[in-house]
Image (tube, rainbow, N blue to C red):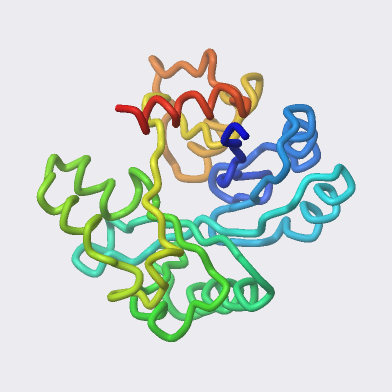
Amino acid sequence: MAPSFIHLRLHSEYSIVDGIVRLEAAVAAATADDMPALALTDLSNVFGLVKFYEEARGKGVKPIIGCDFWLENEADRDKSYRGLLLCQSRAGYLKLCDLLTRAYRTNQYRGRPELKKSWFAEGTEGLIALSGAHHGDVGQALAADNGKQAQRLAREDRFRHRHGIEGANQPVELSCCGSPVDACFRFVDLCSVCDSVSCLRTRRQVARDQTVDGVEHSGRAELRERFLQIAGS
């Protein structure tokens, strides 16, 4: 049986900073591509959970609940890391809600609700943590051309020893970073609008030379082939 692929990152219309994709359209695209499952991982919230769950179940797609989150960088609060949590069970969902509520109530920085690394040591039953790709600590070390630090962070069982999550539930995340916009799950006719919304909400200026032509939702076959190429390199 050939390996399959599903999207584990989706910023929808419920992502306050950078989302614009409607849940109905996202689920319809997954259905058309015969994806067996799809994750919803809006930034710092689960506002769209009920709507997504009902829409996905109604179309025969398994809904995966998760969240893209900010992780406090104790060394420099202005350079927070990112990570992603996926729920394996009801216990994981309740823990995710607890972490997000705690971040909003007790640990906001410049309007960002940030999770603390120490909170994970208090229990993480039912959660899977992705490393955050180029936005995580390993990715940021690579971006700073600090290969030794990236290797150290990647090799140590970080979420077991430092965050309390069992190592088997903390895979290293890969991401293609060539696009000028984060194309986790985008539609080509919405990319310009999505980036403009992000700029308005974060007070950034739209780059004049920034183009988004060709950025679109990639199908299972294309993405499976990309990952097979990475595995063989």
Question: Considering only vertical position in the picture, is 32 above or below 101?
Answer: above
- Residue closest to the eye, 172 or 140: 172
- Residue closest to the eye, 112 or 171: 171
Please give the name of the residue rendered at 60% of the width and 52% of the height, measured from the top-left corner.
42
Residue 89 locus on image (x, y percent): 66, 71
Question: Considering only vertical position in the picture, is 27 above or below 53?
Answer: above
Q: Tell me the quarter of the picture where residue 191 sits.
A: top right
> How many numbered marks are there?
0
Residue 28 locus on image (x, y percent): 80, 34
Residue 43 locus on image (x, y percent): 54, 54
Q: Tell me the quarter of the picture where residue 126 sits.
A: bottom right
Please give the name of the residue rendered at 19% of the width and 66% of the height, measured from the top-left corner.
75
Please give the name of the residue rendered at 48% of the width and 74% of the height, measured from the top-left corner.
103
Q: Quadrant of the N terminus?
A: top right
Q: Is residue 154 left or right of residue 184?
A: left
Residue lying furthest bottom: 122
Residue lying furthest front: 1
Q: Quadrant of the C terminus?
A: top left
Please give the name of the residue rendered at 40% of the width and 47% of the height, measured from the top-left corner.
173
Residue 65 locus on image (x, y percent): 66, 59
